[in-house]
Image (spheres, rainbow, N blue to C red):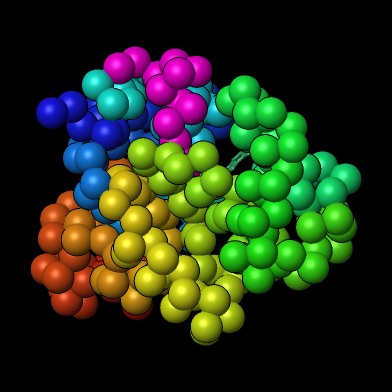
Amino acid sequence: MSAALEVESLGFSFDGRRPVLRGVSFRLEPGDSLAVLGANGSGKSTLLWCILGLLKARGVVRLFGEPRTRRSLARIGVVFQNPEDQLFMPRLVEDLSLTLLNRGHPPHEAAEAALRALESAGLGHAANSPASQLSLGQRKRAAIAAALICRPELLVLDEPTAELDGRSARLLREHLKSLPVAKLIATHDLGLAREVCPRVLLLEDGAVLAEGPAAEILSDSALLERAGLI
Ligand SMILES: Nc1ncnc2c1ncn2[C@@H]1O[C@H](COP(=O)(O)OP(=O)(O)OP(=O)(O)O)[C@@H](O)[C@H]1O
Ligand SMILES: [Mg+2]
């Protein structure tokens, strides 16, 4: 079976001089979950943006065995590190229904599904307000609900728990564990990585420092210290 995601020798520089990603390669099988861990500035978000084609990197990205296209990108749900990158409509319910409208759902169906998704994220009361009037954690929860609304086969999440309170983070971990889809999660949250991801990729200064079973890597304190995580 094709991998959900294959990344080969990805390289990227913002200014054409200092490399930010250096030869990153990995595979993510369908239904598998991989945590991308690394210190601030190690290149986690840049890696995700390059995978999504929002930054133009050298190297190869394949989604579900195909080159990256509009069609294969439509099978991915994304949560950016900054919710402002994906929630910008006058009303939150419109942010969530937009993805469904883009996929051809009728407006009334899209609006109903968006409202249901917001209610189950505990944000039903904010459906008619803009995301900018929510707290950062609430915006993050809304962005996660938006990513899940189209039942993606691959979830790409950038720091999904960073601003969440303890209960919201626990509920999210439980929710993610229960979803049988592939997940690529950039995070500093070692608890999230341990609980949700059987495998871990450690980034150091844009290069892969280690990749392997979470149980092995997350118990190697010398490695975690070198990567700036403890
Ligand atoms: N728009 C940009 N222009 C120039 N350099 C950038 C830009 N965005 C990020 N960088 C640089 O690229 C490097 C990697 O940044 P990136 O945001 O990918 O790190 P990260 O691992 O996601 O960090 P964090 O844990 O803080 O989210 C950093 O050195 C950063 O300064
Ligand atoms: Mg980041």
Q: Is residue 57 magenta?
A: no
For image coordinates 79% across by 57% down, the residue present is 127
Relative to 133, does residue 3 appear above or below in the rendering?
Answer: above
In this rendered view, identify the residue nearer to me: 15 or 164: 164
For image coordinates 65% across by 70% down, the residue present is 122
- Furthest residue toward bottom: 166
Q: Which residues are magenta?
A: 66-77
On the rendered structure, is 138 left or right of 190? right
Q: Is residue 69 magenta?
A: yes
Relative to 129, does residue 148 appear above or below in the rendering?
Answer: above
On the rendered structure, is 175 left or right of 86? left
Q: Quadrant of residue 68?
A: top left
For image coordinates 60% across by 71% down, the residue present is 163
Relative to 214, does residue 8 appear above or below in the rendering?
Answer: above
Q: Please provide percent x and percent y for residue 1.
A: 13, 28
Q: Please provide percent x and percent y for residue 33.
A: 27, 53
- Does residue 19 show up? no
On the rendered structure, is 216 left or right of 174? left
In this rendered view, identify the residue nearer to me: 68 or 76: 76
Q: Please provide percent x and percent y for residue 166.
A: 52, 84
Q: Quadrant of the C terminus?
A: bottom left
- Does residue 49 show up? yes
Counting every numbered tag in the picture gives: 0
Q: Please provide percent x and percent y for residue 176.
A: 38, 61
For image coordinates 50% across by 60% down, the residue present is 159
In this rendered view, identify the residue nearer to me: 129 or 218: 129
